[in-house]
Structures are given as structure tokens and as C-alpha cells.
Amino acid sequence: MKKMLLSFVVLALAYAYALNPQTASKEELMSIKGIGPVKAAAIMKYRRNHRIRNREDLMQVEGIGPEIADNVYSDVKVGEVKQKKRIFKSNKYEAKKAEKKAKKAKKRSLLFGGDKAKAKADKAEAKAKKAKEKAKISKIDFKKAKADKAKMKKAEAKLKKDRATLREDQAALRKAQKAKDARKVASLKRKIAKDQARIRKDQAQARPLAR
């Protein structure tokens, strides 16, 4: 009975905190496995005129099949590095598009003149600048996430190695204690204390990267 109740609570919490495709931002949609910039844009375009209340509604969006719909409602996410890469690529594309529009608007302003054309060109230029800055920030985020993942892998490998050394030393200590070799026992105890201190240090270094 307790297990059933716990399962119900877990499912209820998962449903409560799952991503809502009707209100989610483009970045949030791209955090879901199977959804990149194109599919995220398609969802955002579809929901302008339609309500997305369940899986069936979501599957009306072009390119969204049962697997992706399940990922959305089960909150199945891609890795952080992959998500940051998707966001960076999407922002880079948007920045290029905005820059192209700004150049076109400026050209029209120079050709035809007038306050309206100039205002339009200035607005397009400001939008392009903002998009470029957004792409720059997302590039920094992506590079940082990539570097953190590499550091995390290195920290995990070091922790694994140090734990293996500790196990070996603990086995050697048991052997020395059995053989009643007091000198070796004392030496191994000091070594084990160093091993444990090293492991604590490894864990402290890995902890901020795991957040």
C-alpha cells in the first residue's frame, strides 16, 4: 500500500512539474529530447491559434510524433551541453537573420529616405544588435557547459582511481592485521587516511560541477 502511494506521489509530482508545451519558452522546449530549434518553432507557431492540452494536441504539430510527445509530458531532457549547443545554434541563426533584415532596411532607408524608413532601419539595427548579443551569451554558456562536462569527467575518473587505491590499501591493511605486522599496519593506516582525505577533496571539487 505504501509503495503504491509513493508511486502515485512521484507520478503526481512529475505531472505537476513537467514542461507545459502551451506556455514553455523556446529554450525550455529545446531542453526536451527530440526537440531542436525547428520543432520548437513549429510548436510555438501552432499554439498561436491552437490550444495544446495533451499529447494528442501536441501530435497535431508537424514533426511531433508519439515518442517526442511522451518525452515532453514525461519531461525527458537532453544533456545540458546538447541543450546549450541547440540554444547557441538557434540564437546564431536568429542573429544572422536579424542582421540581414537590418542591412536590407538600411539600404531601403538610404535609397528612399524619409523618417519612417529611417525609424524602421534603426529598429531593425537595434533588434540585430540584441540578437547578436544573445547569440554571444549563449555561445559563452555552451562553451562553459562543455568545459564543465570535461572537468566533471576528469574529476569522476580521479575519484574512481582514488577509491580503487583506497580499496586496495584497506585489503592490504586487513592482510597486515591478520599477519600481526604492526609496522605495516601503522604505515597502511596513515596511507588510508591520506586516501580518504584525497577522496574528500575529489568530491568537493566535483560537487559544484554536478549542480
Image (cartoon, rainbow, N blue to C red):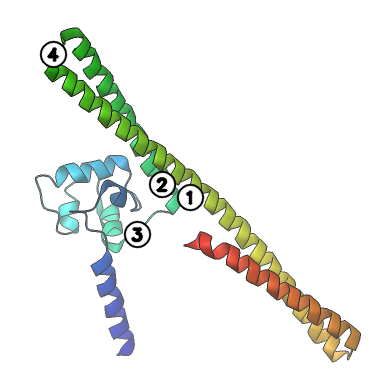
Mark drawn on residue 76: 3
Q: Which residue is mark 1?
A: 145
Q: Quadrant of residue 133?
A: top left
The nearer-to-camera label among 4 and 3 is 4
Q: CA distance from mark 4 to mark 2?
A: 42 Å
Q: Which residue is mark 4?
A: 114
Q: Quadrant of residue 106?
A: top left
Q: CA distance from mark 4 to mark 3?
A: 52 Å
Instruction: Tell me the kind of residue under disc 1.
Output: Ala
Q: Is residue 92 above or below residue 103?
A: below
- Direction from residue 33 to residue 189 in the image, left or right: right
Mark drawn on residue 95: none
Instruction: Tell me the kind of residue under disc 3.
Output: Val
The nearer-to-camera label among 4 and 2 is 4
Mark drawn on residue 84: 2
Which of the pair 65/86 is nearer the observer?
86
Whichever of labels 1 and 4 marks the residue nearer the N terminus, that label is: 4
Q: CA distance from mark 1 to mark 2?
A: 7 Å
**Helix, strand, or loop for circle 2?**
helix
Q: Given contact means CB atoms under 8 Å apart, are the residues at marks 1 and 2 in contact?
A: yes
Q: Quadrant of residue 136?
A: top left
**Helix, strand, or loop for circle 4?**
loop
Q: Is residue 123 above or below residue 155?
A: above
Whichever of labels 1 and 2 marks the residue nearer the N terminus, that label is: 2
What crowding class fits label 1: few (fewer than 14 Cα within 10 Å), some (14-19), or many (20 or more)? many
The nearer-to-camera label among 1 and 4 is 4
Instruction: Tell me the kind of residue under disc 4.
Output: Gly
Whichever of labels 4 and 3 marks the residue nearer the N terminus, that label is: 3
Mark yes or no: residue 58 visible: yes
